[in-house]
Every structure is written in structure tokens, then in C-alpha cells.
Amino acid sequence: MKLEERDGRELIALARECIEDALHARELPPFPHRDYRPTLQQFRSAFVTLRSREHLRGCCGSIEPTCALAQEVWQDAWTSAFRDPRFPPLDAAEWPTIRLHISVLERPRPIPFASEEELIAGLRPGIDGLILECNGARATFLPSVWDQLQHPREFVHCLKSKAGWSADFWSTDMRASIYAVEEFEETVG
């Protein structure tokens, strides 16, 4: 079921509420059970991204859905603010500078490829999120990463690096899936 703009506004408000509730305790606040719209009760995966003055400040989420979308966003907001290993926990002084972005993933679909060249040729810059998996390691880039890595080869090589592989790593056991997202950005002011 496709999300509407009002769903996005509600998800942004929910993520903001979670982070505000957690700013002092640093613990995940209890999820507020409310009468959510059916679209927010769907089992969907999502990522919540925090930006401070246009710089990444946290981004966490899930590739596979494990709960209702509203609860997923609640958990991801907290994890992005306080548990992203790339950043220290968010503090109250930073909070006013933070803008939230939510990406709700469509179900990933495997794509066939016989070589890295085929994989690269099959990507749609600016549209496809990509998941690479091999030998128990897995990494993903959201479609928004195309803003920084615009060439498909660079996109794939940097994703390999994120997974802990070298840029020239290749294995016949490698699997790839692509997905699109529905995106919601917090408005300023």
C-alpha cells in the first residue's frame, strides 16, 4: 500500500517524538500504541537519517521488515540518534540543528548478473538502492547515496568497501538485490 504525504508527516513526527523523549535518558522510550492508519501498520522496512547543517549525523534502519512501519521508524530514529557507531550519541545542544529524513523501502528484488560489469550496467542511478551479499557479509546503499556517488562503478566499489571487501573483490557467490524507496523529508521551520 503506497504511503501518502500525511503518512510521511506522521512518521517524521513519530521519529522526532522518540528522539526528544530519549534525549536525556538515552534509552529507547516505550513505543506509543495509538490508532495508526493502516498504511503505518504495514510490515515495512525503513531507514531514518539525521542531518545537521546538511552533514550526515546518523542513519540506521533495516532491510527486512520485522514489525509495523510506525514501530520500525520509532526504533530506527532512536538507533540513528544514539547508536550509529559512526557518531557519538546525539546531545541536547545538537538537537535543534537536526533535520530528519525517512526512507521506506519497497521489498528488495534479486537481480541476476554474471559479472561486475553486468551488475553495474543494470543499475539505475538515482533510483535503485542496492544490497550486496557474500559469505555472510551484507551491505546496502539507499538511493539517496547516488547524490554523492553518481557513477555506478563508484557506487558499487564504495558499497563493497562498506561491506568490508576491497573495491576489486569479486566472487561468483555474490548476490545483489535492488529496491526503490518512498522518501519523506522534514521541512525546515
Image (tube, rainbow, N blue to C red):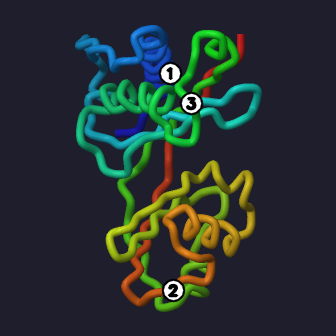
Q: CA distance from mark 1 to mark 3?
A: 22 Å
Q: Quadrant of the N terminus?
A: top left
Q: Position of residue 82 (x, y in %)?
A: 47, 27
The residue drawn where x is 70% and y is 17% is 97
Amino acid type shown at disc 3: Pro
Q: Quadrant of the C terminus?
A: top right
N-terminal of the two: label 2 or label 3? Answer: 3
N-terminal of the two: label 1 or label 2? Answer: 1
* Total marks placed: 3
Provide the residue designation for mark 2.
170
Q: Classify mark 3: helix, strand or loop.
A: loop
Q: CA distance from mark 2 to mark 3?
A: 34 Å
Determine crowd level at label 1: few under 14, some 14-19, many 20+ residues with C-alpha closer than 10 A: many
Name the mark nearer the viewer: 1 or 3. 3
Give the quadrant of residue 90: top right
Provide the residue designation for mark 1.
12
The answer to whether the residues at label 2 and label 3 have Cβ atoms under 8 Å apart is no
Left or right, residue 110 beside residue 100: left
Q: Is residue 168 above or below residue 37?
A: below
Name the mark nearer the viewer: 2 or 3. 3
The residue drawn where x is 47% and y is 85% is 113
The residue drawn where x is 47% and y is 40% is 60
N-terminal of the two: label 1 or label 3? Answer: 1
Q: Classify mark 1: helix, strand or loop.
A: helix
Q: Is residue 140 above or below residue 135?
A: above
Amino acid type shown at disc 2: Trp
Q: Position of residue 3 (x, y in %)?
A: 43, 33
Q: Is residue 178 above or below residue 33?
A: below
Provide the residue designation for mark 3.
88
Q: CA distance from mark 1 to mark 2?
A: 39 Å
Q: Position of residue 12 (x, y in %)?
A: 50, 21
